[in-house]
Amino acid sequence: MQDPIDTRTVQRIRRALLAWYAHNARDLPWRRTRDPYAVWVAEILLQQTRIDQGTPYFERFLAAFPTVEALARAQEDAVLKLWEGLGYYARARNLHRAARLVAFERGGRFPETAEAWQALPGIGRYTAGAIASIAFNEAVPVLDGNVKRVLARVFDIAAPIDQAATESRLWTLAGALVPPRRPGDFNQAMMELGATVCTPKTPSCAACPLRTLCEAAARGTQAERPVKGKKPATPHYEIVVAAIEKNGRFLLGKRPPSGLLGGLWEFPGGKVQAREAHEQALKREIREELGVEIRVGGLAAVVKHAYSHFKVTLNVYRCTIESGTPRPVAHSELKWVSRAQFGRYAFPKANLKFIGVL
Ligand code: SF4
C-alpha cells in the first residue's frame, strides 16, 4: 500500500481499533478521567516509564498535588521527592514550571489545542497530541514507540524508523488515521495495541483486530519491523563518590537546577580520568567541587547504573575532611545530613542503590 491511505482502509482501521479498544482497554487510573491536569501528569510521567512502575507514582502525585494550582504552589524539592527513582527529572521540573505558567499567568485556564500545549515547557508534539485528543477531543495524532511499531508493521515500512524522513511519514500516517470523533480513544487504542498485542518481540497477530489489514502479517515480515538504524555503543564511565562523614552526618550537594538530575541531592564525586587511581580522582574531584582536602578511607559500595545514553559504575568511598570548609562550587547548596534524615531528600536512583549501606 502506498501513502496516502485510501479512505476505505482508513475507515476499516478506525472501526476495528475502536471496537477492539472498547473491550480490551486496561483499566488504568488516568483513563477514568478527562481532567486535563490528570491526563497531562499521566502523559509526562509515562514518558520513558513503564505503566506498572508509573501507576503508583501517578496516584501519589495526584494525592499530593490534586490540582494545577496545588502543584504550582509546591516547592520544587517536594515535587522532585515525589519523582525520586523515576529518572528523567527534567520532566518533573518542566511540569512544575508549566503548572506555574498555567496557574499564575493563564488564571488556571488550560490550553485547549495541541499547538497551544506545545508552548508550555516540556511538552513536545507527542504529549501535546495526547492531551489535546484525550482531554479536548482534538483530532490530532500521537506517535510514541508503540504507535511507530504498529504503523511500521501495518504498512510494512522497510525504512529505519529513527530516520527523520520515516518519522515524518509516520506522523502523516498517524494523522490520516485519527478520526474526528473519539480521537482520544483512537490514539489510546493505537498505543494499547502496541503495548499489549503488537509487542516488540512476539506480536499476537492471531488476536489482533488489524490482522486482515496488516501488510507485515500478510508478508510474514512482522519480526523484521520496525527496522531500526544502528545505535552507537553506549559509553561507560567509572565514577568515584565520596561519603564524607562528620559527627554522624554526611555531606550532600544539591545539583544545579538545570541539566541531568538537576535539583536532586547527591553524594559528591565525579568521573575517573584516564590513568587516574580512584583515590587520586576522588581527591581531585572533591577539591574541584567543594574546595577541601579529604582523606579517602575504605570502599563502602560499588554499584552499576544505566542512564539512557551511558552507563556508570559508582565506587563509593568513606571519607573525612582533612582541611578546609566545604563550599558549593559545583552545587547550588550543601548540607550535612544524618542517615535518619536521608528520606527527606530526593536522590538520583544511582545514589539510592548504595545509601542503605552507609
Ligand atoms: S497483525 Fe500482527 S504485526 Fe500486524 S498489527 Fe497486528 S499484531 Fe502487529
Image (cartoon, rainbow, N blue to C red):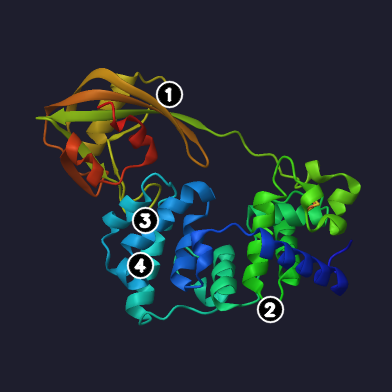
Identify residue type, mark 3.
Arg
Could you say where residue 253 lies in the image, as x and y percent from the top left?
A: 24, 42
Up the image or down, 46 lies above or below 200; here it is: below
Q: Earlier in the sequence, mark 2 or mark 4?
A: 4
Q: Which residue is mark 2?
A: 181
Q: Are marks 1 and 2 in contact (CB under 8 Å)?
A: no
> Which amino acid type is shown beneath numbered disc 4?
Pro
Residue 75, percent from left and from top: 26, 61
Mark 3 closeness class: few <14, some 14–19, many ≥20 residues within 10 Å: few
Which three-letter amino acid code belongs to the residue tagged 2?
Arg
Mark 2 residue crowding within 10 angstroms, few (<14) / some (14–19) / many (20+): few
How far across and down, in percent of the image, does residue 249 sit?
14, 34
The residue identified by callout 1 is 274
Say whether residue 333 is left or right of residue 103: left
Going 85% across and 50% down the picture, which residue do you hit?
216
Give the distance between the C-alpha atoms of the residues marked 1 and 4, in whole angstroms. 49 Å
Sequence-first tag of 3 and 1: 3
Q: Is residue 326 above or below residue 163?
A: above
Which residue is the site of mark 3? 60
The mark closer to the camera, 3 or 1, is: 3
